[in-house]
Amino acid sequence: MNRAIQPKIEPLKSLTLPLPERKTLENGIPITLINMGSQQVVRIDILFKAGTWCQDQKLQALFTNRMLREGSKKYSSKEIAEQLDFYGAWLDLSCGAAYSCITLYSLTRCFKETLTILESIIKEPLFDADRLEIVKDMNIQQFLVNESHVDFLAHRSLLNMLLGDSHPYGKKTVKEDYSAITTDLLNNFFDANFHSSNCHIFLAGDIDQDIFDAVQSAFGLAPFGQYENTPTVCPTPIFTPSVDNQRFIDKKGACQSAICLGMPTLMRSHPDYLKFHVVLALFGGYFGSRLISNVREDKGYTYHIGADMTHYPFSSFLMIHTECDNEYVRPLIEQVHFEMDRLHSELVNEKELTKLKNYMLGESCRSYESAFSIADAWMFAFTSGLDDDHFSKSFESIQSITAAEIQDLARKHLRKESLKEVVAGEKLL
């Protein structure tokens, strides 16, 4: 190889994700297998349709999920931590809008031992009252720290403006909500939702028959939990968006102001969604975007500004977020509006469009380069209700979009008149 000669640049012609293998365990739990990779590592994700959307009270789903690692009938919280550390394993608990997920990373040779711990955590958690108080105190302290940050205040207030007080995500969490969490609430939520009839398993990495048999033995032979229960039906939300389009939160002593702009946008099922995702990337979705080039590089108002989409059951929102010196708030928002108008009035030139496409295609390749990242992709498709061809369609949308389509989509779906605006910071005299 002559390293003085640049390798030939070849365009990326296609991107196909390996299809997972889908099976059903003996007790009816569906399992998705991604058998890839040369490293002797396994990851198991156990999903329950038990996200915040299903809860009866604020924080109920979050604390039920969080308390799983705080002790079971076989292991104390200390023993769980020490055993996982001894085997070189990692346990992660996450709670989203629709699903709660328990994730275990383990060396292949130690998988049976770590799976035994995971089985106890999921099937027989204790929800100990003393441990709950410790966890609540920790979360309250983190909540109070967050409340001192202008970006947290602005984002929370924007959701309230977009969704209203009657919507599960529009209600503002307060300190008293943490105190209201009890072991009875957690047990009730666990019994209703954490059982084999409400479960889906993803298994990725170095998988052989022994690994599959171990999962079958732990979770697939017999039903577990209150499996006779009908899974909680997520209620259809009530949207009561604010009639006002601007809100200011005065935060004394704030060195900077946080700016959050938002509006309803396309659901993932909308026919324009995939190509509009490209438009949003051009506008503010990567480091070479219009907003970065204008507001950061040209004007110097902020270090970073971004635009992205947030998805909830029954709704999706476009959000623009940044922080800047208090005196630059209005000029910065004006530049956001200016860039929206420019996408309406001017066709993007070929050089900029080519750079955007190359970035997005390259990111697609980097996002799907390992067994675990591919497992993340298929979990995303499953929890979002997407078809198997979603990723190839996304790739095709990036490749085929034209400057005229970008302009048309921006005119239809990126309108400054629809934006609601929240600013949190110190009020200037």
Image (cartoon, rainbow, N blue to C red):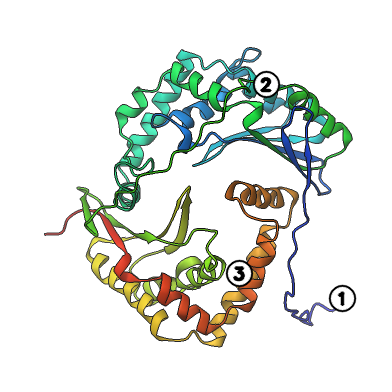
Q: CA distance from mark 1 to mark 3?
A: 29 Å
Viewer-side residue, 303 vs 170: 170
Viewer-side residue, 60 vs 36: 60
Residue at horizontal 75%, vertical 63%? 16
Q: Amino acid at mark 1?
A: Met
On screen, residue 258 versus residue 13, left or right, reads: left
On screen, residue 222 versus residue 414, left or right, reads: right
Q: Nearer the viewer, mark 2 or mark 1?
A: 2
Q: CA distance from mark 2 to mark 1?
A: 58 Å
| Contact check, label 1 and label 3, Cβ < 8 Å | no
Residue at horizontal 29%, vertical 52%? 241
On screen, residue 184 versus residue 372, left or right, reads: left
Q: Quadrant of the C terminus?
A: bottom left
Q: Is residue 191 above or below residue 236?
A: above
Q: Position of residue 298 (x, y in %)?
A: 38, 77
Q: Badge 3: how crowded within 10 Å, few (<14), some, or many (20+)? A: many
Residue at horizontal 49%, vertical 58%? 267
Viewer-side residue, 214 vs 193: 193
**Visible residue check, residue 320:** no
Residue for badge 1: 1
Q: Position of residue 246 (x, y in %)?
A: 23, 59
Q: Amino acid at mark 3?
A: Met
Q: Is residue 239 above or below residue 267?
A: above
Q: Position of residue 49 (x, y in %)?
A: 57, 36
Q: Nearer the viewer, mark 2 or mark 3?
A: 2
The numbered mark, 1 or 3, whose residue comes first in the sequence reads 1
Identify the mark at residue 344; answer none if there is no mark: none
Q: Is residue 260 above or below residue 100?
A: below
Residue for badge 3: 360
| SS under mark 3 | helix
Residue for badge 2: 224
